[in-house]
Image: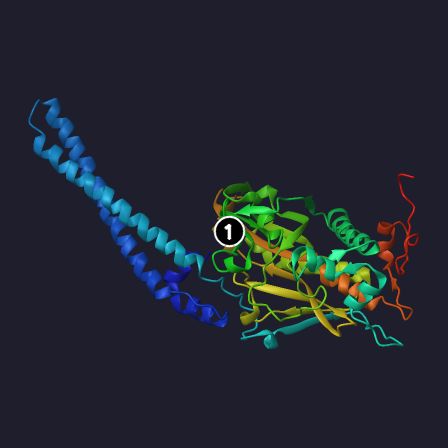
Amino acid sequence: MLDINIVRNDIEKVKQAVFNKNEKANLDSLLEIDSKRKALLIECDDLRNKRNVTSKKISKLKSKKQDASSEIQEMKGVSDNIKQLEVNIKALTDELESILLNIPNIPASDVPVGKDPTSNVMVKTWGKRKEFSFTPLPHWEIGKELDILDFERAAKISGAGFTLYKGAGARLERALYNFMLDLHSQEHGYTELFPPYLVNRSSMTGTGQLPKLEEDMYRIPEDDLFLIPTAEVPVTNIHSNEVLSAKELPLHYAACTACFRREAGSHGKDTRGMLRVHQFNKVELVKLVRPETSYDELESLLSVSEKVLQLLGLEYQVLKLCTGDLSFAAAKCYDIEVWSSGVNKFLEVSSCSNFEDFQARRSNIRFRDDDGKIKHVHTLNGSGVALPRTMIAIIENYQREDGTVEIPEVLRPYMNGLEVINKRKKSSQRIISFFS
């Protein structure tokens, strides 16, 4: 949520920011409602002062045993007026908040202005593209042939947009997120969390998914709970309605959760395999930091997410998103895209964003600085990284001409030393059990 003083003091700047983000917001109505509300607040304060004066006058008259009936009647009328004003103020406050909740965050000054992804700016590339002596296959063909991915049975169970991992495919998925969590918690100093998958409306509003994106969310109407679209939601809201001490900051959290997205409006896009699914696992990194350090923290967050792909030996590129491609809540964002040879394109596996105090205002996350002043923290998050497309990149980039898939060296300890995924047989790919 924007600080309303920014809208009051520079509405043209906010209007331009909303336009640059391809969003809409009723800013003129907001200022009109804000003006009415301020006038009613002044009127209400004046009446409260009048009531206090009249109350003292009544006490004085009664102490002298004089008639105070007219003053009592006057105070009753004043009290009735105050009650009605408070009702009107509450209605205007709710209306004001509703408009504020629908105003997007203002892009940072160094974000490129543009309407769509064609205006995103390449800032980095890493790795060398693998050369094949054969035509590389897409992951859905490899997964079916090796019997590690089953999309048909997943569709039978749940419908389109789901994946059934089998055998070495399931182990590879588990190896990936265990590797990522170990990297972030043991080497990068993040505190590992395992949060709830269901969150309330307040939490979804706090991180900015609601009210704008409600149609994209899975909701349980009886309890008004939502399946999380990302661990960003529960992890950021751990500290909602709290005042932290300055010495507690920065807070760095890592969590691997399932993520659930209806993907409303995405019908017909990337429907093959695991390119676009309704349920997937993702390791999310969340930071709560001092405002003056948040952009340094963003660069650090980006490098931590990149490290995952570097250790996996996967070619990737980093894009700075333009205003029109930024999310509703982000002030600045980098996307990391990994190259995948079978589908022959780059796939987004991470978005690293700085929200400044936008989410903190909505979730009421504050800290007391060294001077004793209470301020809002800045929040950041990034994928470290999303698993389905990382899995796609591994399967497609590490495929071999004989149809097998080599396992990246860094993942082999997490798969009990397995080096190659071969076609599944009843007795094949059996690994040494810790329990045998």
Residue type marked 1: Gly
Say which of 284 and 142 sits in front: 142
Quadrant showing the C terminus: top right
Judged left or right of residue 21, residue 31 is left
Q: Position of residue 405 (x, y in %)?
A: 87, 63
Say which of 56 and 321 sits in front: 321
Task: Name the image quarter holding residue 66.
Answer: top left
Q: Where is mark 1, residue-wise?
A: 206
Q: Which residue shows up at 8% across the image and 34% down it?
A: 70
Q: Which residue shows up at 59% across the image and 63% down it?
A: 263
Say which of 252 and 368 sits in front: 252
Judged left or right of residue 96, residue 148 is right
Q: Label 1 crowding class (10 Å Cα cut-off): few <14, some 14-19, many 20+?
A: many
- Would residue 306 be seen by someone viewing this image from the given angle? no
Position above or below: 294 against 60: below
Q: Where is residue 12 in the image (x, y as percent from the top left)?
A: 40, 69
Q: Which residue shows up at 78% across the image and 72% down it?
A: 342
Q: Where is residue 346 in the image (x, y as percent from the top left)?
A: 72, 71
Q: Where is residue 384 in the image (x, y as percent from the top left)?
A: 70, 56
